[in-house]
């Protein structure tokens, strides 16, 4: 039985396979129907799901994550019928987005119906909806018979989980179950677009890029730092709590590729002179530069080639977690990744993790 106190429950681990898929999904759906919490993979990151229309169940998500009240949750849906149940006055452009990008990594913010409790929407009149491109959450929503409130399955302020191990590290004893379905394919959270305003506003960059959105619905307005902008990204309503902040100080260096390597080298020398323990989150190319410079990296996590932002995106949150666990004083981060494709979203997450940024 579940303990009343949200943070003293037994967390069951389901390892899903072809053979037990049906049985696991039935059990997980039963937990959701009884008002419990289940974490599961999606194609973006692991989500922590509960019945999004049940305020008591949603309260357990806030408790488990220590998520500040008022930060809106989004809902995972399984069908057009689900959308009609929770959203109203849906603009024609939003239907076009659903046709083009669902199931997939796009959260669409729409006017909500009264059936969506205020705790779910953070008292906003709108709600974010997403149909995930992953069999486990799709089946779970279908079998539970309700849209799932499903934020990323991490403690608030920690990097989002791209592995079940990350969920277990943060939420064991706080949630009812975790479905381990392996690593997530994309590794960064979905693009969020607010369709309640005109032109629509992109609140969070993700795997669906601005250019792709504009091909389908025309002009959109991004409200976070552009990949090549030197300005600190604006914090938007609904985004204001969303920090990816490891406990260790994170210093990001962006700009010209050669200069980035040199700047990281001089930051390293300064830090070592101050007796600091230094870690690195680097592209293969920048790491290669250090090898040839004869500088020895103390703790280095490689994100892959800077021309392969998709791979770097998949590895990013693992890298932040691994380095954050090593009791370092500072993590020096390579911002020389190509801003094409997932690169824009990758750079956005690097900036959010950083407490200090250099542009060179
Ligand atoms: O890829 C994803 O979206 C993952 C997976 C698990 O689905 N989920 C996720 O959830 O990242 P969460 O709660 O960590 O992020 C949802 C984002 C937040 O930035 C939230 O502020 C925003 O969507 N959001 C939700 N409803 C909103 C609303 N009504 N207005 C503005 N922003 C909203
Ligand atoms: Mg999150």
Image (tube, helix red, strand yellow):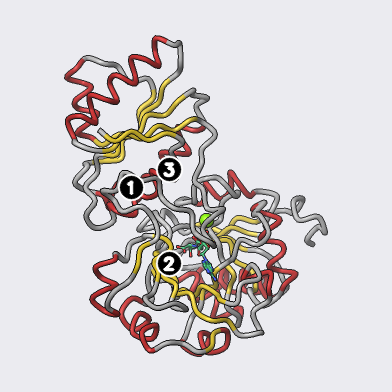
Task: Kindly identify which residue carries mark 1.
Answer: 347
Q: Residue at x 58, y 66 (%)?
A: 73
- Earlier-in-chain disc, 3 versus 2: 2
Measured from the top left, where is residue 300 in percent x and y?
Answer: 35, 28
- Residue at the spot x=49%, y=23% of the render? 329
Q: Marks 2/1: CA distance?
A: 16 Å
Q: Residues within 10 Å of mark 3 (few under 14, many from 20)?
A: many
According to the picture, the residue beneath numbered tag 3 turns out to be: 318
163 to the left or right of 71:
left
Check disc 1: other Cα within 10 Å, few if <14, some if 14-19, many if 20+: many
Kind of element beneath mark 1: helix
Q: Find disc 2 in the rendering and name its residue.
A: 192
From the image, state whether disc 3 or disc 2 is nearer to you.
Answer: 2
127 vs 117, left or right, is left
Cα–Cα span, label 3 and label 1: 16 Å
The N terminus: image quadrant: bottom right
Please report whichever mark, 3 or 1, sits nearer to the chain's N-terminal start: 3
Secondary element at image label 2: strand
């Amino acid at each position: 039985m579940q303990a009343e106190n949200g943070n003293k429950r037994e967390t069951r681990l389901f390892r899903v396979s072809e053979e037990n898929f049906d049985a696991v999904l039935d059990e997980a759906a039963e937990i959701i129907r009884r008002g419990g919490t289940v974490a599961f993979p999606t194609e973006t990151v692991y989500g922590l799901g509960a019945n999004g229309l049940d305020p008591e169940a949603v309260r357990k998500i806030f408790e488990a994550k220590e998520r500040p009240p008022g930060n809106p949750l989004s809902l995972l849906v399984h069908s057009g019928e689900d959308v009609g149940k929770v959203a109203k006055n849906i603009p024609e452009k939003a239907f076009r987005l659903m046709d083009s990008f669902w199931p997939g990594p796009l959260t669409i913010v729409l006017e909500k119906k009264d059936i969506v409790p205020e705790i779910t929407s953070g008292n906003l009149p709108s709600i974010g909806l997403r149909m995930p491109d992953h069999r486990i959450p799709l089946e779970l929503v279908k079998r539970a018979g309700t849209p799932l409130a499903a934020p990323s399955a991490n403690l608030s302020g920690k990097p989002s989980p791209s592995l079940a191990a990350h969920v277990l590290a943060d939420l064991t004893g706080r949630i009812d179950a975790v479905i381990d379905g392996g690593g997530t394919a994309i590794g960064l959270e979905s693009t969020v677009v607010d369709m309640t305003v005109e032109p629509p506003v992109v609140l969070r960059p993700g795997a669906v890029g601005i250019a792709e959105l504009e091909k389908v619905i025309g002009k959109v307005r991004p409200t976070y730092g552009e990949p090549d902008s030197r300005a600190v990204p604006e914090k938007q309503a609904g985004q204001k709590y969303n920090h990816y902040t490891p406990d260790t100080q994170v210093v990001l260096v962006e700009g010209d590729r050669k200069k980035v390597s040199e700047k990281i080298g001089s930051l390293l020398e300064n830090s070592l002179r101050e007796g600091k323990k230094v870690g690195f989150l680097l592209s293969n190319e920048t790491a290669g530069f250090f090898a040839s410079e004869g500088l020895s990296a103390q703790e280095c996590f490689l994100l892959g080639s800077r021309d392969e932002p998709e791979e770097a995106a998949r590895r990013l949150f693992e890298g932040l977690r691994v380095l954050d666990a090593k009791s370092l004083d500072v993590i020096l981060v390579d911002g020389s990744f190509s801003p094409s494709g997932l690169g824009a979203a990758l750079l956005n997450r690097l900036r959010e993790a950083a407490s200090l940024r250099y542009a060179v």
